[in-house]
Image (cartoon, rainbow, N blue to C red):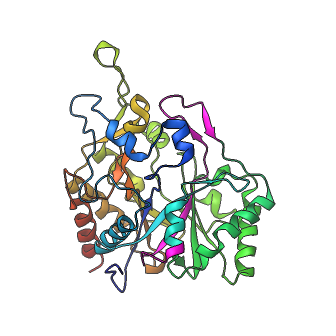
Amino acid sequence: MTPDRPPARECRLIAFYLPQFHPIPENDLWWGKGFTEWTHVKKARPMYPGHSQPKLPGELGYYNLLEPEIRHKQAALAARYGIEAFCYWHYWFGNGKQLLEKPFNEVLRSGQPEFPFCLGWANHSWTQGEKDPENILINQTYPGIEDHIRHFHALEKAFHDKRYLRVDGKPLLFIFVPDGIPRVEKFLACWNDLARKSGLPGIYFIAHLNRGNLRAEMFIGKGFDAATTNLSVTTLKLRNPVWVRACVKAGLHVPTIFPYRTFTSDPIFSTPLLHYQHAMIFPNWDDTPRRRDRGFVLTGSTPEAFRRHVREVLATTTVQTPQRRLIFIRSWNEWAEGNYMEPDQRYGRRYLEVLQEEVRRAFP
């Protein structure tokens, strides 16, 4: 099945894609037999009056990503509403250790679905989250140049796949914690050299600004091609010292709560972008299924509030060429973080419809 994808695009919508919707032995050990991301989602309960939990999936249901039919349905749905590609989160912890690689490996092996993709290296350690955030389950390591070479060759086939998303001919790699890689300039130079030897023009590296004190210029000078805009929780704390983090009656703790409209009204979402910046949009956020009272909740997200957010973000990208007008959606299916574009039982496909409507309005 080939998704019905528009032949030409004035902007390139890329949705982050979480693969943790199938069991793996490590999660069985850490969280219990049969654990997937749905385990958190199903256990979620309201933590304060008006808290919209649990989130209930719509037409796709509580799926398993090892089922090819589900991956086809996701791709067809994304393509129907103008999303160009999925950015699969990729986990490489050093010394060849990977996790959650099966869904993407099946996409690569089978050649299906015929829907563009790229990879985002989620280079961070895993902890026990709300149970014990200091307890590291698996540590992100950087053993050195030999491991960088091994890592590249593990992804080389993907980079050459005709579906792999490219910018100026280069396969795109998104790096979640760019400042976490020791001597990152050497890593980038190594991979660019290996890419050229492999017949590619290089790698298009994008740095994720994962903390409020990071600036795009810090990474462009180190060899990155671009950086995203991002309004992190840390940034919100710095810019908005007055917000809610409190206890309610009977000692029940509540998460950090912040209005969606205030979040999306921040100037970072309306300031025109430079040529090396790529926009990011957020349908919502609520990671209390994972983090409970340590979580962060955006309140008041609706399709119409999302429309305003998308409209403002799209307006910041008009000076960029269509090839580089990348807009990252966070996310396609982060159900336990409450940021997803997949249909749910409350709004159905409405967020997807709004996204498509606003793109058509901005680029008729």
Verify whether residue 297 appears in magenta: no
What x and y, as percent, mark residue 93? 66, 51
Residue 88 seen in the figure: yes
User: Looking at the image, which is closer to me, 58 or 119?
Assistant: 58
Verify whether residue 120 appears in magenta: yes
Residue 241 seen in the figure: no
What x and y, as percent, mark residue 355? 28, 66
Query: In the image, what residue occupies the spot 47% across and 46% down?
Result: 232
Q: Locate the C terminus and report the quarter of the image it occupies.
A: bottom left
Write down the region rendered in magenta: 109-138
Query: In the image, what residue occupies the spot 40% across and 67% down?
Result: 68
Q: Locate the N terminus and report the quarter of the image it occupies.
A: bottom left
User: Which quadrant of the figure has residue 121?
Assistant: bottom right
Query: In the image, what residue occupies the spot 59% across and 73% down?
Result: 158
Q: Is residue 154 above or below residue 127?
A: below
User: Looking at the image, which is closer to me, 119 or 233?
Assistant: 119
Extreme top residue here? 250
What x and y, as percent, mark residue 129? 50, 35
Secondary structure, magenta segment, majority class: loop
